[in-house]
Image (spheres, rainbow, N blue to C red):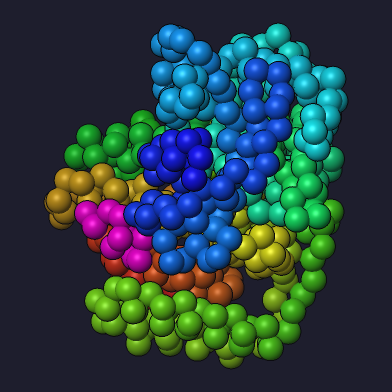
Amino acid sequence: MNDLSTALTTWLPHQRWFAGKGRTISGVTIERETPMAGLSHVVLRVAAGAEAGADGERYQLLLGRIEGEVPPRLAAGLIGKVDNAVLYDAVHDRDAMGALLASFAAGDAHGGLQFTCAGEVDSSLPSRVMGAEQSNTSVVYGEDLILKIFRRLQPGTNPDLEISRALAAAGSPHVAEPRGWIEAELDGETTTLALLQVFQRHATEGWAMATASVRDLFAEADLHADEVGGDFAGESERLGAATAEVHLTLREVLPSRTVGPQVAQSAARQLHSRLDEALTIVPDLERHAEALRETYDAVATLTDPIPVQRVHGDYHLGQVLRTQTGWVLLDFEGEPARPLAERTGLMSPLRDVAGMLRSYDYAARHLLAERGGDPQLAYRASEWAERNRQAFCDGYARAAGADPRADAVLLRAFELDKAVYEVVYEARNRPSWLAIPVGSIERLAGSAPGDRR
Ligand SMILES: Nc1ncnc2c1ncn2[C@@H]1O[C@H](COP(=O)(O)OP(=O)(O)O)[C@@H](O)[C@H]1O
Ligand SMILES: [Mg+2]
């Protein structure tokens, strides 16, 4: 390993977006390095632990170099010292990020990196790095633009670019319009490295609004969810409608079809096998295995055609913004840990509905998990979750012209599948939250198909 590789081996595990946490990095290879104004664009291969495979995973890095004293503004991005120079993550460097924006405006190409500009870009805007816990890194320019730098690279067009462009071209009001993108060839395929979008000013994340509403309810011990000031159900209804409108647009402008019973059977097999895998990691789930398997078996017996299309793929309250005019959906990447081919596949839009319904359960119950299960608060959390889940489905039904709750078997199976995934995740990462998905499985698997929850 050269010195840069050594420095990265120490630095990478501390980055939120690094997927190889908990695994020992056995090698960092610099696959390509492209000098640009004020920084170097670097593609890395990281081999970590046994799961990584022979080649490891690819990441990208905007690398800055400075000799002498490091100014405080760059301190947050420090990587290490190599040959008298200090290396840092250049997303923190306003000059370098300004130069990057100028490359969009000019439609530059730097050694295989192609910048495409779609619309107006003011390259004088000052940059700041978003502080959020993210799986990628986003740089905000003034109050106008946001550049999302995809950290993990897989060859091909990133679905976030593909879907955002398709929605914007169709005139959807529920998307942050793309203003540019950076691409390069990776394994012979045009690969999206970064996406520049219109920044939504004065917007609030769905998760922040929903959890504020839950806190309001907990503070008003004598009132019900519909009586407190922070009631969220009206917003949930509008979010449901926005979700349905996005699904309708995607169905029109991107591939879609209906699939027959064989696909329902293979979907059921997949659900079973995911449960099998989860049981090896969290054997406690065995208590619910029978009820889960019954739900999955019911999927295999479905005979009606099932519509499939492009969907969001990783839908929850942290992926939606309430702007002054309505709901905007973000982050159409799907689950970044899954292979690209899977993420761009056609799926039932009920997957997204199920994802959001799970998110309502989390918003309602995560405070409870931290406060150690007060039964009075638990009752109120259930009431909040129920009210908002129904409102979301009401809004979806209104805009789609079909009620997602009518497909009770599929919707329940998708929700349970998601909850099983969450059980594994919480068992590994946040045992204090494990009660949330386990409780949902108890409620969902315990009710008869067709019940309105
Ligand atoms: N166009 C935008 N306008 C305003 N804020 C945004 C925009 N895009 C993203 N954000 C903020 O950045 C966060 C992370 O963005 P996201 O695309 O979901 O990235 P990640 O893939 O890292 O999850 C969002 O939850 C939101 O708060
Ligand atoms: Mg996101």
Secondary structure character of the magenta stretch overall = helix
Residue 333's spot in the image, x, y percent?
63, 50
Say whether residue 218 is left or right of residue 420. Answer: left
Residue 444 visible (yes or no): no
Query: Magenta part of the protein: which range?
Result: 423-432
| Total marks in image | 0
Q: Quadrant of the C terminus?
A: bottom left
Residue 367's spot in the image, x, y percent?
26, 44
Q: Residue at x 46, y 71 (%)?
A: 417
Say whether residue 9 is left or right of residue 100. Answer: left
Residue 217 vs residue 365, the one in the foreground? 365
Q: Residue at x 55, y 85 (%)?
A: 269
Query: Does the magenta-highlighted stretch encompass residue 426?
Result: yes
Q: Is residue 282 above or below residue 330?
A: below
Residue 215's spot in the image, x, y percent?
29, 36
Where residue 208 sits, quadrant-wise, is top left
Say whether residue 139 is left or right of residue 246. Answer: left
Where residue 350 sits, quadrant-wise, is bottom right
Q: Residue at x 53, y 16 (%)?
A: 66
Residue 7 vs residue 174, the one in the foreground? 7
Residue 202 vs residue 448, the one in the foreground? 202
Where residue 69 sits, quadrant-wise, is top left
Q: Is residue 410 above or below residue 56?
A: below
Say whether residue 193 is left or right of residue 378. Answer: right
Residue 426 vs residue 101, the one in the foreground? 101
Residue 8's spot in the image, x, y percent?
46, 39
Q: Is residue 69 above or below residue 335?
A: above
Q: Residue at x 80, y 33 (%)?
A: 111
Residue 222 visible (yes or no): yes
